[in-house]
Amino acid sequence: MEEQEKAKSKINLNRVDMPRQDPKVRAHNYNEVALGYTEEMALEEATRCIQCPKRPCVSGCPVNVDIPEFIKALKDKNMPEAVKILKGKNALPAICGRVCPQETQCEQACALGKKKVPIAIGRLERYVADWDLANKDKRPPVVIPPSTGKRVAVIGSGPAGLTAAADLAKFGHKVTIYEALHTAGGVLMYGIPEFRLPKAVVQAEVDYVKSLGVDIQLDSVMGKLATVDELLEKDFDAVFLGTGAGLPMFLNIPGENLNGVYSANEFLTRVNLMKAYLFPEYDTPIKIGKHVAVIGGGNVAMDAARCALRLGAEKVYIVYRRSRTEMPARHEEVENAEEEGIIFKFLTNPKQIIGDENGWVKGMECYEMELGEPDASGRRRPVTKPGSEFMIDVDVVVVALGTTPNPLIPATTKGLDTTKHGTVVADEQTGKTVKDRVWAGGDVVTGAATVISAMGAGKRAAASINEFLMK
């Protein structure tokens, strides 16, 4: 008992913070906000891990990374081993270290989480992954196993598709990814801004997947170029659908068709994938007025608002119908947005968007809301306050209310079950759909969710596909 008390007294509760750009500076540039750990910081944070035998953090990770093992290798300064352990389960660690909600997953499960100072697992993951990207010459050679002779088509190169493809290649299968856009990466490329996830990092992770022997075909809109059935008939033994959820949702209020109203999808795709923030070097037009309202409270809303600020808007509002407590965005992203000067209008819901005589946005009429009883999501339901209408002076509105899957693949694939929300029905553990030789995972199954949950789905589906193929 005395020894246990001694061990407890030695636990370091001083979590190492990660340096960030100054808010006044970063609000006007697209450079990465979080600057990453130095070697000294990473080693100091790694020594805080108590290597507890039950390893609860691993069960909190959707892809079951061997977290204590990679942290121990880091602490021992054996970086190639840390990389090997990390990449053994996670094909995209530099991405996950930046955008995963570790605070609700592995870090929440950490033994030190009870003292509210969990190990900074995400920051250590980023450090190890960035070391790997900077030291490619120290990587062990990629060993591609003997070919099984089996071929798998993966539709979509987002986190689910990339993870499934990487794991299937490691099993020895020949994998071809079909990507509709001109760049691989899916939402990692078109959705998440440069200041949160540098595109060079995404490209490096895509290149790693390619190095495993995966063939990536760009500008390939499946459902138009070929149907799922045609792929199965001609060249492939199995198909994985990782097409994501790229169809925006709207409020269906008056004025949503005015000029100056964007879906967050279009807005972020123009900014990120098509480089509108580098205009006129890249000739993608984007209208940014003086006052911008972003409707929604998730990470996508934070991304859109912070992009609008960097594009030159004088005032940017986040309009959210619930209170701060119910906001689904990561605490870190809300904090970053506040520090940069984003104005939060909580308990506010749009009634209509007002246009001028030329059909351009000039304002937005809103209701004040109050919270009632909890709804199906467990959050208190917002209720309109009668007679509480007021105006916000804006000239651009971005609607960030979530997304649903594009209907193209379900519409062109016989025998695929979908829900009323347009998502594909698939087994939660295996990703198997009701259609023979077809699996699915990520946002196309769950609706818009996190990068790491999509990766977990891709990983489980790859294991199920491999089991099927090897029978």
Image: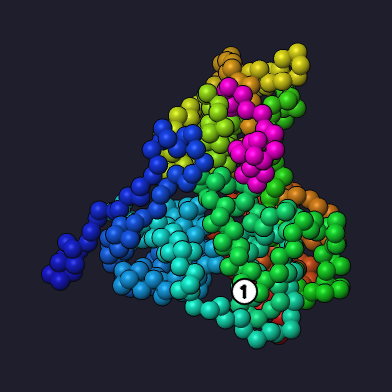
Q: Total number of numbered labels?
A: 1
**Hey, which quadrant is residue 313 in on the image?**
top right
Magenta range: 269-293
Q: In what element is the residue under mark 1? A: loop
Instruction: Provide residue 325's location: percent of width, then percent of height.
Output: 45, 37
Return the residue at label 1: 212
**Hey, which quadrant is residue 33 in on the image?**
top left
Instruction: Provide residue 388's location: percent of width, then percent of height.
Output: 56, 16
**Pick the front one: 156 or 443:** 156
Amino acid bearing label 1 = Leu
Residue 286 falls inside the magenta stretch? yes
- The vertical placement of 23 against 196, above or below, is above
> How is the rendered protein coloured?
rainbow
Q: Quadrant of the C terminus?
A: bottom right
Q: Residue at x 54, y 57 (%)?
A: 201
- The vertical placement of 68 against 41, above or below, is below
In the picture as drawn, the residue positioned furthest to the front comes out as 281
- Tell me, yes or no, if residue 230 can be seen here: yes
Q: Is residue 469 left or right of residue 192?
A: right
Instruction: Provide residue 399's location: percent of width, then percent of height.
Output: 64, 34
- Tell me, yes or no, if residue 381 can be seen here: no
- The vertical placement of 207 against 380, above or below, is below
